[in-house]
Image (tube, rainbow, N blue to C red):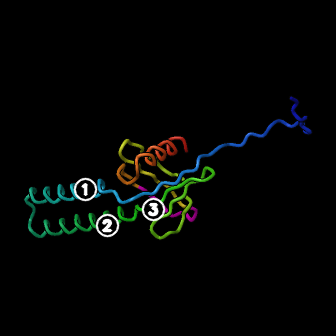
Amino acid sequence: MTTPVCSSNSPPQYYERSARLSCVVARSSLLHLFLLLATGQAVLLLWLCDLPLWLFWLSLLLVCVYAFLEKRRLGRMVGVISTRERRWFWRGESDEEREFEFCGELVLLQWLLVIRGRDQAGAPLRLVLARDALNGDDWRRLQVALRYSR
């Protein structure tokens, strides 16, 4: 059997491969539980400090406002994280896909991922994902992709 002769003498072109990834991120009950425990601990600490009554109520108000804002932030971490051609994308509840680049540290633990980035407009993007927010296969693939993406 013969093989056809190549008409050009140029070396073969190797295309860089990049994996495609698309992971659906759901609400994390684990992160909500940690927030509830941290809020309860802060309230207990305020109670045990024996503060003057006006300072106790002011501090309690600040703790509750902070917990409410963090709960809203955790609620917005529902969407789809994906990659295409070595570019990362986040599509949240607004159904608007935002391309982002990594900036700052990337935390990769067995149960927690913290992704910090900026989108094309320069707006900051912070994703805090717990293991229960993704199914097992997507969690493993996302960790591997993040580990080798930088």
Q: Nearer the viewer, residue 116 or 52?
A: 116
| Label 1: element kind | helix
Q: Tell me the magenta residue range.
A: 120-127
In which quadrant of the rendered view does residue 62 lie? bottom left
Q: Please tell me how crowded label 2 is: few (under 14), some (14-19), or many (20+) other residues with Cα within 10 Å.
A: few
Q: Residue at x 50, y 45 (%)?
A: 146
| Label 2: element kind | helix
Q: Nearer the viewer, mark 3 or mark 2?
A: 3
Spot occupied by residue 80 in the image (x, y as percentages of width and height): 48, 59
Q: Which mark is residue 81?
A: none
Q: Please tell me how crowded label 3 is: few (under 14), some (14-19), or many (20+) other residues with Cα within 10 Å.
A: some
Q: Nearer the viewer, residue 95 or 38?
A: 95
What type is the residue that disc 2 sits on? Leu
| Relative height, residue 135 to residue 62 (above, below) | above
Spot occupied by residue 12 in the image (x, y as percentages of width and height): 80, 37
Q: Are marks 1 and 2 in contact (CB under 8 Å)?
A: no
Lateral position of residue 104 relative to residue 129, left or right: right
Please check the rendered image and state whether residue 133 is part of the magenta-colored stretch, yes or no. Answer: no
For label 3, the residue is 79
Q: Are marks 3 and 2 in contact (CB under 8 Å)?
A: no
Q: Nearer the viewer, residue 72 or 80?
A: 80
Of the two numbered discs 3 and 1 on the same chain, state the one appearing first in sequence.
1
In which quadrant of the rendered view does residue 108 lie? top left
Q: Which mark is residue 33?
A: 1
Q: Residue at x 54, y 63 (%)?
A: 98
Q: Which mark is residue 69?
A: 2
Of the two numbered discs 3 and 2 on the same chain, state the one appearing first in sequence.
2
